Image (tube, coloured by chain):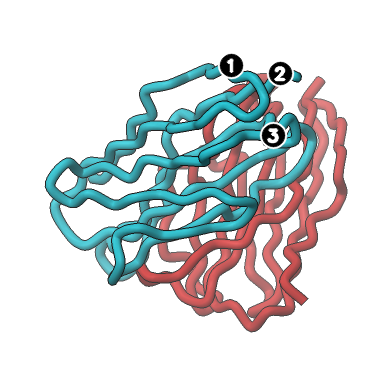
Chain colours: A red, B cyan
Amino acid sequence: DTEVTQTPKHLVMGMTNKKSLKCEQHMGHRAMYWYKQKAKKPPELMFVYSYEKLSINESVPSRFSPECPNSSLLNLHLHALQPEDSALYLCASSHGDRAGTEAFFGQGTRLTVV
Amino acid sequence: AQSVSQHNHHVILSEAASLELGCNYSYGGTVNLFWYVQYPGQHLQLLLKYFSGDPLVKGIKGFEAEFIKSKFSFNLRKPSVQWSDTAEYFCAVNALTGTASKLTFGTGTRLQVTL
């Protein structure tokens, strides 16, 4: 199984809503990532988890709150988002958080904030 | 901090034409280099990667790339493109930063192959 599964595929939420994005992998990877991709732009790193601990936060606003309940799961909790947060949110995983490993990406959650 | 530059933002080719997409990176240490492809409506897929060894790497679907350390380049090539190669192509560099690695993407090149 070389898949990274993200749910939901699409999400529309209001600015006062609280929602969560979920990501799951069963490849035994110990590093997991959240990226944000706006239309016609490259993915931008948001968070890195290594061995279930947050190792990189790219100065992401606190309305985005990541969580890694176990080595296979990664969540992104959303609260009080703005319309400009609408984007494709990608989850990825890799064997480790060291250089020398490739990342596998999920299909993404397309988020629209209204 | 590492950075990646892709000079071609939009490339239009006829089927069977040869392809070369430029990628230059900036980083003082050891890097790993990747090319990812994103077909319309699909997720990012790895085309090929360079970690060490032979600087000419071959990937899936007939793509190859050459790592030239002196030029900080990792250009993607394909001798004969197909209509199905129409997609967005991202060069990426993975460098160790502190105790974690960061995968940084270039701005992408949109390839359009016409029949």
Q: Position of residue A83 (x, y in %)?
A: 70, 20
Q: Amino acid at mark 1?
A: Ile
The residues bearing labels 2 and 1 have C-alpha atoms spaced at a distance of 7 Å
Q: Is residue A66 visible?
A: no
Chain assignment, label 3:
B
Query: Where residue B19 appears, x then y in whole percent?
Result: 50, 31
In the image, what residue type sits under mark 2?
Thr
**CB-based contact (under 8 Å), mark 2 and mark 1:** yes
Horizontal side of residue B76 vs A61, given as left or right: left
What is the spatial separation of the Cα atoms under label 1 and label 3, in whole angstroms? 12 Å
Which comes before the other along the chain, label 1 or label 3?
1
Question: In front: A114, or B60?
Answer: B60
Q: Is residue A105 visible?
A: yes
Counting residues from the start of the chain, the first of labels 3 and 2 encountered is: 3
Other-residue count near label 1 (Cα within 10 Å), few / some / many at <14 / 14–19 / ≥20? few
Residue picked out by circle 2: B114
Circle 3: residue type: Gln
Q: Is residue A100 above or below residue A71?
A: above
To the question of a shared chain for discs 3 and 2, the answer is yes
Chain that bears disc 1: B
Eye-nearest disc, 1 or 3: 3
Circle 3 residue: B82
- Where does residue B73 sit, x and y in percent of width and height? 26, 42
**In the visual, does A107 lie left or right of B1?**
right
Q: Quadrant of the C terminus of chain B?
A: top right
Query: Which one is earlier in the sequence, the residue at label 2 or at label 1?
Result: 1
What residue does disc 1 label? Answer: B12
Q: Residue furthest bottom?
A: A28
